[in-house]
Amino acid sequence: MLKFEEYLAQFTNTILLSEFLINILVAALLAVVVSWFYQRYGNAVSNRKRFADNFLPLALTTLLIITIVKSSIALSLGLVGALSIVRFRAAIKDPEELTYLFLVIGIGLATGANQPIMALVAIFTILFLVFVHKKINGQIRFKSEDAMYVNIHTDVEELEKITKLLTDKMSYVELKRLDTLDQGLDLSFICKADSIQQIQTVAQQLKGLSTNTQVSIIDQPDLIA
């Protein structure tokens, strides 16, 4: 018990509790803002909402680590040693995802270093510049998470014809896998549709390619390996 009291006294001597709480609130606020921005204006095809759910815990964890080790060289060296044995295996499917991860880590670093004002100014400035850049390039658009995985098993061997059928009706089409069969093709696409009617129309037209055509449509392309 005495050791804990000594540690608490040492902690409060180096880090004011009020400042620590302010940094946590600022980090949480900025992580939520970045999460909202990414979901609304991100261009990644994968489920942006699911990916953005990691932003808040990532920012707060980074803040906690930096807050603890910044006042101790021994702890800093220990952290370097501990992280040297950690291997991250998460698959980053889009460079944009990595960019936002670094942005969220930056929030944790700035607030952990007791620079909440700098974090606020920097993040809002960066997001504003990103917004302007997307606006200039015509990339500002917001769509609900309506992506889907479309698998087509058919005896038709005209890939161009199948792809054109999809691109004429869908707002986004990306070929993910192509397998050639003894007679025909097995195709996997990631697509986005603006309405249920579009999906129904595409499914009917695909089935109309031949009597041996099978169509499977699954939500959430981020589940695809």
Image (spheres, rainbow, N blue to C red):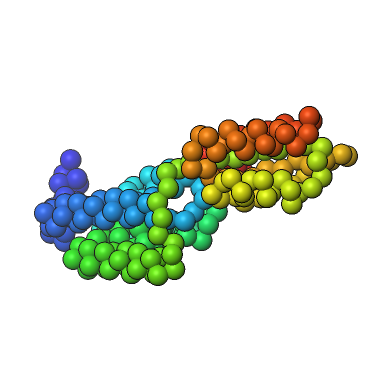
Q: Is residue 25 above or below residue 70?
A: above
Q: Is residue 120 left or right of residue 99?
A: left
Task: Classify 168 as above or below 114.
Answer: above
| Residue drawn at x 47%, y 56% as measured from the top left | 43
54 and 49: which is toward the camera: 49
Q: In x, y percent, where is residue 155?
A: 82, 37
Q: Which residue is depicted at the point 62% across and 50% down?
A: 167
* Location of residue 106 by image quarter: bottom left
Place of residue 213 in the rendered image (x, y in percent of width and height, measured from the top left):
75, 33
Residue occupying image coordinates x 41% and y 55%: 141
Residue 176 seen in this snapshot: no
Quick one: quadrant of the N terminus?
A: top left
Which image quarter is the C terminus in? top right
Q: Is residue 108 left or right of residue 207?
A: left
Q: Quadrant of residue 199?
A: top right
| Image location of residue 63, percent across then percent down | 29, 56
Q: Is residue 35 left or right of residue 118?
A: right
Nearest the eye: 200 or 53 = 200
163 relative position to 100: left or right? right
Q: What residue appears at the point 71 percent right and 45 percent down from the top-left corner?
A: 162
Q: Is residue 142 visible?
A: yes
